[in-house]
Amino acid sequence: RYAEGVVHALALYLAEGTHALDHADRVEELLVLDGPIYPKELFTWGDRDPELGELAREAKPRAVVEKYVRLVERFVERDVPLAGFVKNPSSRTVVRSLTRKGIESPWPDDTALFTRLLERREASGDPRDPERAGGGRLEDDLTFTTWFHSRGGADRTMAADADALGIDRELDPELYEPTFMILYDPRTDVTYKLEAPYAFTREAETRDRLTRQVLGDVATTRGPPTAVGKADSLARIDATEKAALRRKFEERFDSEQQATYDDRRWGKDR
């Protein structure tokens, strides 16, 4: 049931972590990963389902995660900031914390909560209307939060007092902890998340530089930073390329892909 997703995630993160490490010394000012700074999907496998947890133990994701730990250490050593731009943040850590404290949250996830906090609307003129639902959204300025430590949810694995899957951390464990800020673009009504290890955001000057960098990028592109947008375009595989990849795997392993009814229903090109 989970084999395909596990193989996909391991291949994706292993390729990204290896590529980033291989080219780390070529980065002179800032490295922005397309997504979180750690492969968080791998952190949740053990808790989601017994079958997935067993499969994860067999797959040994520790070797993949270690690539990212070494990446952080390499960039700390070179004094070059490392960050991750998350286009579709989906954490529920904050809203779950509110629920545990007895506060009923009307938001399904943290992104919805931060969007409501950062969105600015024209006053409706009715002081009894705290939501100001009658006013239109103001689109003149990007809005954003300060920086936060994240030690809950999937980020718990890399907290200072957690075991990081048993990976040896050469620096103070606190320096590996994920920190984040939230950015809202009212022009597109989209909320983004910028992450960075605490090793870089502990200094106010670096936090300010990272904030200004991502604000400038989003303001200019009306979307993700140019480098992340480029990564998106390079990662896109069309139907013809997918068919070619399938044929290449079939040749390499001397085995044909098992056919399904969906192949006929959707007219999959072989």
Image (spheres, rainbow, N blue to C red):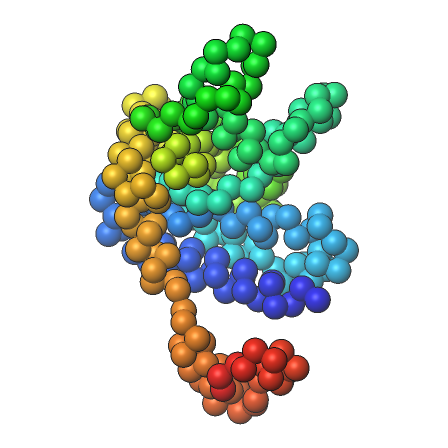
Left or right, 227 with reference to 10 = left
* Quarter of the rendering occupied by the N terminus: bottom right
Residue 154 location, x and y as percent? 60, 41
Tell me which residue sits at (24%, 52%) in the image.
26
Q: Nearer the viewer, residue 199 or 194?
A: 194
- Residue drawn at x 35%, y 44% is 224
**What residue appears at the point 71 percent right and 24 percent down from the top-left corner?**
104
Up the image or down, 45 lies above or below 248; here it is: above
Q: x and y percent of residue 83 in the render? A: 38, 40
Position of 194 compared to 132: left or right? left
Left or right position of 172 against 219: right
| Quarter of the image where one finds residue 100 | top right
Q: Is residue 15 above or below residue 248?
A: above
| Residue 117 percent location from the top left of the image | 50, 23
Is any part of residue 162 visible from this angle? no
- Camera-side residue of 38 and 146: 146
The foreground one among 48 and 170 is: 48
The image quarter containing residue 96 is top right
Location of residue 160 with respect to 78 vertically, above or below: above
Q: Does the rendering let one see residue 87? A: yes
Residue 171: percent from the left, percent from the top? 45, 36
Depth check, front residue: 247 or 155: 247
State the image quarter where residue 194 is shown: top left
Q: How many marks?
A: 0
